[in-house]
Image: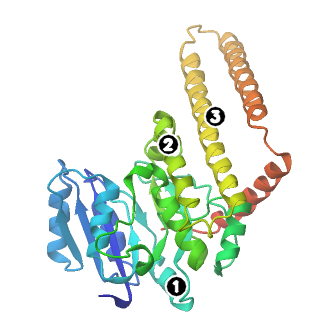
């Protein structure tokens, strides 16, 4: 059964007691209230279960379910998707936060474009304590709200890279929940699980885009937290998952959606992302090294301290630039692509600065 014009929210939770109340309150206070908020607890051992039960007791919109054993976020989300009854569905992490007006603006443009499979917006990264860290490097493909038909979706993906974000993607449920026996997400695809689903839906039905920050993603490690850490710490698993995604794209069922040049470019961008994360990690390590060197200063002479700091800083920056130079030589970066990315970055930065998430 599908309730026309309504939205279901699915939220898997595992030990997010510090954030889940904030996350649920942001959802429940939306100007467009969801039909249901399906929370799936995945065997939490902190106080999050008590918090969820307290909120659910006062808000019948919140439907609370507990897994018998830990299933992981993808399987918990699959469980919630099969329970959902709204026309639209949104998957939300229990430690993230949606911005005011997110549901209203997204559902409105989806209603205006009934052929669209999903709607995506811009994303803000916040720190562990809730403070803004930086805006996510999600390409800004348009300065105004728009609907992109399938062919245009493919063109923008080739030109700008992956511009959908799972944290801001609201799907037309019938396009992702085919039946009660079919999962939405494949855990074996690792961090690419949401990539392939959003790409299939968007390249088959088209997608809407809103150039506003409408959700936040909480970062725990460095700049991009969990995802970046796993890209690096389990790189072999990441490459294996990417290979599975490519097999799906080249399969008989989906090959018409993904031409050969598109698949090749997608592989290239994903591998470039892994390389960029390596460089980012190296940069962060060098910053830490520089701080350590500074702390080793023992001389009481101001001049000695100054000279010591300058020497060590020069050593670190020399190392950084040499490593960066060989990195860019190794991946044979296209200067025209680099210029285009810089222009896109500056354009996006302007839009992000004018967009707030309070």
Q: Is residue 152 above or below residue 342?
A: below
- First in sequence: mark 1 vs mark 2: 1
Q: What's the residue at 15%, 66% (across, down)?
A: 53
Badge 3, how many Cα within 10 Å: few under 14, some, many 20+?
some
User: Dividing the image into 4 quarters, which one contains the N terminus?
Assistant: bottom left
Q: Is residue 205 left or right of 107 when viewed as pictured?
A: right
Q: For the residues marked 3 and 2, what is the alpha-carbon distance in whole angstroms?
A: 21 Å
Q: Secondary structure at mark 3?
A: helix
- In the rendered structure, find residue 240 and report the number of the disc placed on it: 2
Q: Which type of secondary structure does the marked residue at label 1 adopt? A: helix
Q: Which residue is mark 3?
A: 279
Q: Earlier along the polypeptide chain: callout 3 or callout 2? A: 2
Is 341 on the left-hand or right-hand side of 206?
A: right
Q: How far apart are labels 3 and 1 at the CA level? A: 39 Å
Q: Looking at the image, can residue 213 be seen?
A: no
Q: Is residue 124 left or right of residue 46?
A: right
Dot 1 alpha-carbon crowd within 10 angstroms: few under 14, some 14 to 19, many 20 or more: many
Judged from this view, the residue extending furthest toward the right is 336
């Amino acid at each position: 059964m599908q309730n026309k014009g309504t939205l279901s929210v699915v939220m898997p939770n595992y030990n997010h007691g510090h954030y889940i109340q904030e996350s649920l309150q942001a959802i429940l206070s939306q100007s467009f209230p969801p039909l249901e908020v399906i929370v799936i607890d995945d065997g939490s051992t902190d106080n999050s279960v008590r918090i969820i039960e307290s909120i659910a007791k006062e808000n019948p919109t919140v439907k609370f379910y507990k897994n018998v054993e830990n299933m992981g976020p993808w399987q918990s989300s699959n469980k919630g998707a099969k329970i959902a009854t709204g026309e639209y569905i949104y998957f939300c992490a229990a430690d993230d936060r949606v911005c005011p007006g997110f549901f209203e603006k997204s559902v409105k443009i989806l209603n205006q474009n009934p052929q669209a499979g999903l709607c995506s917006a811009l994303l803000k990264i916040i720190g562990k304590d809730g403070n803004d860290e930086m805006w996510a490097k999600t390409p800004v493909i348009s300065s105004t709200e728009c609907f992109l038909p399938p062919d245009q979706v493919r063109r923008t993906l080739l030109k700008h890279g992956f511009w959908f974000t799972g944290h801001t993607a609201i799907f037309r449920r019938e396009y992702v929940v085919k039946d009660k026996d079919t999962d939405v997400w494949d855990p074996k695809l690792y961090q690419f699980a949401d990539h392939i689903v959003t790409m299939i839906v968007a390249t088959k039905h088209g997608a809407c885009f809103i150039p506003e920050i409408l959700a936040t993603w909480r970062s725990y490690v460095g700049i991009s937290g969990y995802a970046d850490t796993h890209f690096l710490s389990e790189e072999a698993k990441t490459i294996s998952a990417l290979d599975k995604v490519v097999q799906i794209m080249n399969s008989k069922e989906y090959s018409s959606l993904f031409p050969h040049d598109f698949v090749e470019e997608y592989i290239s961008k994903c591998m470039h992302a892994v390389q960029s994360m390596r460089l980012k990690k190296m940069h962060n390590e060098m910053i830490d090294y520089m701080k350590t060197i500074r702390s080793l200063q023992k001389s009481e002479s101001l001049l000695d301290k100054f000279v010591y700091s300058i020497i060590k800083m020069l050593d670190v920056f020399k190392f950084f630039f040499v490593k960066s130079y060989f990195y860019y030589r190794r991946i044979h970066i296209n200067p025209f692509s680099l210029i285009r990315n810089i222009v896109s970055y500056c354009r996006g930065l302007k839009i992000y600065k004018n967009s707030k998430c309070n």
